[in-house]
Image (cartoon, rainbow, N blue to C red):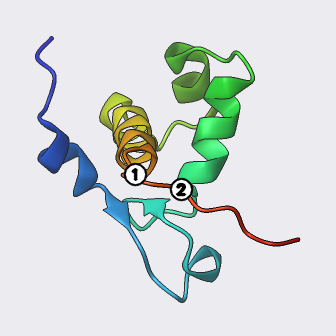
Amino acid sequence: MSVPNADLLLQRITIDPQLCHGKPCIRGLRYPVEFLLELLASGMTHAEVLADYDDLESEDLLAALTFAVRLSQVKQTYAIAS
């Protein structure tokens, strides 16, 4: 299986103020990237997620992971007063 490049994967991420309060979602579906990352972080495998959510595709999960990688690639962080 060939792996799509990051730019193609990121095209699957949509942001629409009318869906999920503007959170980044997969292909305009009501699956926020955050939700998919939580499923994967909880220990679910790609196969388990895809079995539970039949309208998702393998590339959607790769897109969520790619999106998270891009968010983590910051140059500098700042402490926010609490």
Instruction: Indicate the position of residue 40 as horizontal and vertical percent values.
Output: 62, 26
Q: Which residue occupies the extreme right position in the image? A: 82
Is the C terminus in the top left, top right, bottom left or bottom right quadrant? Answer: bottom right
Q: Residues within 10 Å of mark 2 (few under 14, many from 20)?
A: few
In the image: residue 42, left or right of residue 82: left
| Up-down relation of residue 62 to residue 7 (above or below) | above
Q: Where residue 54 is drawn, which disc sits there?
A: none
In the image: residue 28, left or right of residue 6: right
Judged from the image, the secondary structure of the residue bearing numbered disc 1 is loop
Determine which quarter of the picture holds residue 68: top left
For label 2, the residue is 77
Real-space Cα separation, disc 2 to disc 1, in angstroms? 7 Å
From the viewer's side, name the closer residue of 77 and 40. Answer: 77
Marks counted in the figure total: 2
Is the N terminus in the top left, top right, bottom left or bottom right quadrant? Answer: top left
* Residue depicted at 52% across the width and 15% down the height: 47
In the image: residue 51, left or right of residue 69: right
* Residue depicted at 61% across the width and 17% down the height: 48
* Residue depicted at 58% across the width and 14% down the height: 45
> Answer yes or no: do the residues labelled 2 and 1 have beta carbons within 8 Å?
yes
Determine which quarter of the picture holds residue 57: top left
* Residue depicted at 44% across the width and 54% down the height: 76
For label 1, the residue is 74
Residue type beneath disc 1: Val
| Up-down relation of residue 47 to residue 71 (above or below) | above
Residue type beneath disc 2: Thr
